[in-house]
Image (spheres, coloured by chain):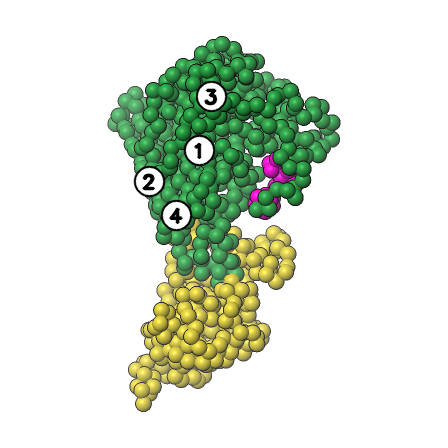
Chain colours: A green, B yellow
Amino acid sequence: MAYTEEELKKELETKEYEYGFFTDIEADTLPKGLNEEIVIAISKKKEEPEWMTEWRLQAFRAWKEMIEPEWANIRYKKPDFQDISYYSAPNKKPKYNSLDEVDPELLETFKKLGISLDEQKKLAGVAVDIVMDSVSVATTFKKTLAEKGIIFCSISEAIKEHPELVKKYIGTVVPQKDNFYAALNSAVFSDGSFCYIPKGVRCPMELSTYFRINQAGTGQFERTLVIADEGSYVSYLEGCTAPSRDENQLHAAVVELIALDNAEIKYSTVQNWYPGDKEGQGGVFNFVTKRGLCEKNAKISWTQVETGSAITWKYPSCILKGDNSIGEFYSIAVTNNFQQADTGTKMVHLGKNTRSTIISKGISAGKSQNSYRGLVQVNSRAENARNFSQCDSLLMGNECGAHTFPYIEAKNKTAQIEHEATTSKIGEDQIFYCNQRGIDTEKAIALIVNGFSKEVLNKLPMEFAVEAQKLLEISLEGSVG
Amino acid sequence: MLKIDNLHAGVEGNEILNGINLEVNAGEVHAIMGPNGSGKSTLAAVIAGKEEFEVTEGTVILDGEDLEDSAPEERAHKGIFMSFQYPVEIPGVTVTNFMRTAINESRKARGLEEMPANQMLKLIREKSELLEIDRKFLSRSLNEGFSGGEKKRNEIFQMAMLEPKLAILDETDSGLDIDALRIVANGVNKLRSESNAVIVITHYQRLLEYIVPDYVHVLHEGKIVKSGTKELALELEEKGYDWIKNEAVV
């Protein structure tokens, strides 16, 4: 049975709120800057065991020696890493007393997305009547999940409650020193999620609602670890279609997926961080490392809709280690105004008969730059590996750019690799044709963009897909004529 | 219904229409003929409101209302339909979805609710039968990979769905073989009524054997130089456009 958001809401409405506001966490912030003392302090604040503190320190030491990468097709002023505060306790106090105090532009967007009033309040930081606090939601969910033996909790909790699992898997797919941002994340990660699906269990619900509600308060350095044990299945939804006005400029998340023999993980993301204003001021820098490992006959699908952030640097990848394993990457990346995105995937074929599919749709408008960067690597022992890649770019206007950087490395002669790429432009003729049929220009663009993105939108879970569709329309509003 | 008075229009300072006068009443079919470059397609585009063309003088009036300030989609909502000579492709958008959007946008403009799904399906079934369209065709992406004939048939299908007051068929016969021409023409004929009007723009007399016009106008250098009944089309076929050109010079 699929557990829907509606059902959850009903359940919460009828449920007495058990815990009240969280008051036992002090709203405190560590001083700016990063050194070993800060890393230790973070670990201490989170009451972590020693092995975790040590793990963070190893990461920090590695990070100190690393240089921020410059190979991506993006231009920005590098953040001053000593001018950031790396720990801030979640602030549970509402920012506003009623919706009237919230930025009307933000509310307008909420309305267009069809987000319920209660949820609007939650997302904008207004005190709510029905408290959709993480604690109560998590409790509701956990009960259903616990019956199946599924563990779904924050990574901090997992470190305390399930150290053996965390210790065994954390850093096995994205090692501490994998790259500059992954190392930084490993040293200072604030929180994130942990999920374990036991052998042979099919997770009965999309793990989504929890995130949508909580997203508004998550920190800069998220760490996610998903483990699907042999023969299990999970569909995981991350992100939020509502615009996140986060004052943190730098975001560096790490997501690790482990699909053991015959397991399947479907990981869907909608990213809508603040992209900066129309002049290109402000906006989030999003440097994410996402990677999944497939054992024998396992399958990992990444689906992403990226519309936000001033800078996106993100390559959800699959290591196809086991024979017959499958990796998939479906992506829509939208850039408008002065946004820059350099995103794509890596498919590393190690096992025999491994297969991968890449469908990337880039939409550029305004003065934005949108790059696809992808690597398909076939190892010498990966007999009969197959890959199909398709990269389509859609341009709107004359001032934006679309770029494709496909890398192919095949060390086995039996490999079959296909790459297709197209670039098209929304033409005045298409718009006029729609206009003539009674469809105004905004709607016409939405129609054309949705048609262009259809293959990827179809991969999203139903209710997410509808929202993502609306999100595409909003992101591109005012980008033509 | 439609009254065009001394219409001058052009693109980037080049005048293409040079004082057009035309009146079309409900229930009538007008054919506009003329040699290449005489301004036939421009006239169609200007009536539909294509912004690329600038109207420098004169008026286009639909049901007593000057269209000067109406955007193309507003003109569509008022009942103007244009069948394109070169219909564009919109990948990933099915014919059905496109029509559903178009119909609902027009309804919204008129203050109506969206058309219920079952009613929409019924309408689609009815109109696709009228134009002998295979229903599978309707779930294909709009005009993508369509043959010339399929594109034109699809245009008339859209016309049937939208039930316009005034339909302008811009060279709908070009690229059609004789069977497709007959189907398209039959479709148009079945849609004719006392309350709507059709302007057929064509190069050749062939289409007019199937869609019989009440009036024929000859366009030359942006002006209507001769008007008559359907016999004029036959005369043109016989004598060619040079005859008109020469007459216009004299």
Same-chain check, marks 1 and 3: yes
Q: Secondary structure at mark 3?
A: helix
Q: Magenta span: helix, strand or loop, mainly?
A: helix
Q: Nearer the viewer, mark 1 or mark 3?
A: 3
Q: Amino acid at mark 1?
A: Asn
Front-most of A236 and A313?
A313
Q: Is residue B126 among what the camera can see?
A: no
Q: Nearer the viewer, mark 1 or mark 2?
A: 1
Q: Position of residue A327 (x, y in %)?
A: 41, 29
In the rendered structure, which segment of residues is drawn in magenta? A106-125
Q: Which residue is mark 3?
A: A188
Q: Is residue A47 left or right of residue B249?
A: right
In the rendered view, would you say A205 is above or below A402?
above
Q: Position of residue A53 (x, y in %)?
A: 47, 13
Who comes first in sequence, dot 4 or dot 2? 4
Q: To which quarter of the image does residue B115 belong?
A: bottom right
Q: Residues within 10 Å of mark 2 (few under 14, many from 20)?
A: many
Q: Disc 3 vs disc 2: Cβ atoms closer than 8 Å?
A: no
Q: Which residue is mark 1?
A: A286
Same-chain check, marks 3 and 2: yes
Q: Amino acid at mark 3?
A: Val
Using the image, tell me which numbered label, if any, was put on residue A367: 4
Q: Which residue is mark 2?
A: A404
Q: Residue at x 52, y 11 (%)?
A: A49
Q: Nearer the viewer, mark 3 or mark 2?
A: 3
Q: Measure the C-alpha gap from mark 1 to mark 3.
A: 16 Å
Q: Position of residue B224 (x, y in %)?
A: 40, 81
Using the image, tell me which numbered label, if any, was put on residue A143: none
Q: Is residue A124 magenta?
A: yes
Who comes first in sequence, dot 1 or dot 3? 3
